[in-house]
Amino acid sequence: MSILALIAASALMMADPPAAPAAPAAAPAKAVQPAKPGAFADDDKVVCKTIEVTGSLFPKKDCRTKHDWAQLAQDSRDLTNDITTNHQAGGLPGK
């Protein structure tokens, strides 16, 4: 029974904390209309990916917009390129 309690406790610790309630908006924001209908619809689509966590039996679910995933990939490529072209041992460029 104690093993089951340990597994349940570790699963609760791995779960994301509940989101704080959003502060009420003072005034409703105006919606910006794209130049052509549906121009931003594809980038605003939320895509969830399952990320395997090393040392854990429980995968992590990460949800971001398509634009955010593309930006994350580009930032990773840029950082990798900076590290490999600058040949700085032991750290990030500029540190």
Image: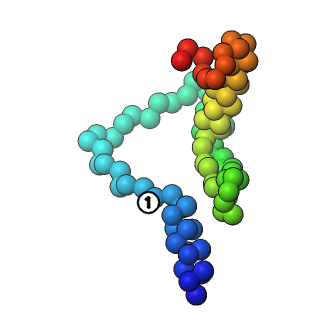
Observer able to see residue 50 = no
- Disc 1 element: loop
Q: For the residue marked with disc 1, what is the amino acid? A: Pro
Extreme left residue here? 26
Q: Position of residue 78 (x, y in %)?
A: 67, 21
| Location of the C terminus (image quadrant) | top right
Residue drawn 52% across and 68% down? 12
Residue that mark 1 sits on = 18
- Residue sitting at x 53%, y 61%: 15
Q: Residue 38 appears in which quarter of the rendering?
A: top right
Residue depicted at 59% across the width and 74% down the height: 7
Quadrant in which the N terminus is drawn:
bottom right
**Farthest front residue in view:** 89
Q: Is residue 48 above or below residue 17?
A: above
Q: Residue 39 placed where, x, y %?
A: 63, 30
What is the image's colouring? rainbow
Q: Residues within 10 Å of mark 1 (few under 14, many from 20)?
A: few
Q: Nearer the viewer, residue 3 or 81?
A: 3
- Kindly indicate the quadrant of the structure image that contains residue 74: top right
78 left or right of 20? Answer: right
Residue 31 picture quarter: top left
Q: Is residue 32 visible?
A: yes
Who's the residue at 54% across and 80% down the image?
5
Frontmost residue, 29 versus 51? 51
Question: Residue 90 at x, y = what percent?
Answer: 64, 23
The mark total stands at 1
Would you place residue 55 above or below residue 72 in this image?
below
Of all residues shown, which one is farthest toward the top? Answer: 86
Residue furthest bottom as drawn: 1
